[in-house]
Image (cartoon, helix red, strand yellow):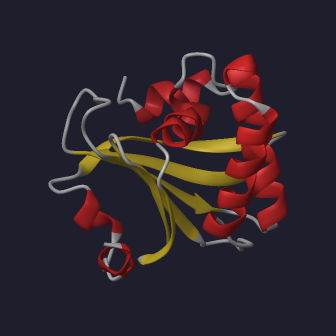
């Protein structure tokens, strides 16, 4: 089973019939950080259907900084629903899932309902996290109504 998922040629195979639901840019203090696109066959987005969040980076960012920013947002949004042990485990999974990025680096996270998340760098599978709770918490960084960037959320959801 693990070999089958590692042999997956691209994230598109995990989200059959995917089309762009919405897209937007994320900037901090006027500096472009990444362009984001949300892909799914289901519109509106549905928790029981796979979807992909594609981030195309516009600047150099270290893997450690990407992981730490993700951990901080998961902690902020999840509060006491996620234990410190769980968060530490997820941090280790994200270290395996992410890479140092340069302008043009594309990381795509695929939400797989009831299973977890798969992370692709370009079209290559980087890592799979088999934990549905992690997958929900991770994608909530962008999709939860309490996200730090509600305008980007609305754009991604095609509203």
- Quarter of the image with the C terminus is top left
Q: Please determine whether, in this image, residue 32 is positioned above or below residue 143.
A: below
Report the residue at 65% width, 66% height from top: 98
Residue sitting nearer the eye, 10 or 158: 10
Q: Quick check: 118 left or right of 100?
A: left
Can residue 157 be seen by looking at this rendering? Answer: yes
Q: Quick check: 153 left or right of 50?
A: right
- Quarter of the image with the N terminus is bottom left
Residue sitting nearer the eye, 120 or 86: 86
- Furthest-left residue in this view: 17
Q: Please determine whether, in this image, residue 139 is positioned above or below residue 89.
A: above
Q: Where is residue 116 in the image (x, y as percent from the top left)?
A: 44, 48
Q: Quadrant of residue 47?
A: top left
Q: Please determine whether, in this image, residue 56 is positioned above or below residue 89.
A: below
Q: Where is residue 66 in the image (x, y as percent from the top left)?
A: 75, 56
Residue sitting nearer the eye, 42 or 128: 128
Q: Where is residue 136 in the image (x, y as percent from the top left)?
A: 50, 34
Report the residue at 50% width, 29% height from top: 143
Can residue 61 be seen by looking at this rendering? Answer: no
Q: How many numbered marks does the figure carry? A: 0
Q: Quick check: 22 left or right of 122?
A: left
Residue sitting nearer the eye, 143 or 102: 143
Q: Position of residue 50 (x, y in %)?
A: 29, 45
Report the residue at 44% width, 35% height from top: 156
Q: Quadrant of residue 67?
A: bottom right
Report the residue at 74% width, 19% height from top: 79
Q: Quick check: 116 left or right of 101?
A: left
């Amino acid at each position: 089973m693990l070999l089958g998922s590692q042999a997956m040629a691209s994230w598109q195979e995990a989200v059959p019939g995917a089309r762009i639901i919405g897209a937007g840019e994320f900037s901090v203090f006027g500096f472009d950080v990444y362009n984001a696109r949300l892909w799914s066959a289901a519109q509106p987005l549905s928790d029981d259907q796979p979807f992909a969040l594609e981030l195309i980076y516009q600047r150099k960012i270290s893997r450690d900084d990407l992981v730490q920013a993700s951990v901080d947002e998961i902690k902020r949004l999840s509060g006491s629903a996620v234990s410190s042990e769980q968060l530490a485990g997820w941090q280790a999974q994200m270290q395996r899932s992410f890479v140092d990025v340069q302008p043009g680096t594309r990381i795509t996270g695929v939400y797989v309902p009831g299973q977890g998340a798969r992370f692709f760098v370009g079209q290559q599978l980087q890592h799979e996290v088999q934990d549905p709770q992690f997958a929900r918490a991770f994608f909530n960084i962008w999709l939860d109504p309490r996200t730090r960037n509600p305008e980007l959320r609305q754009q991604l959801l095609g509203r």
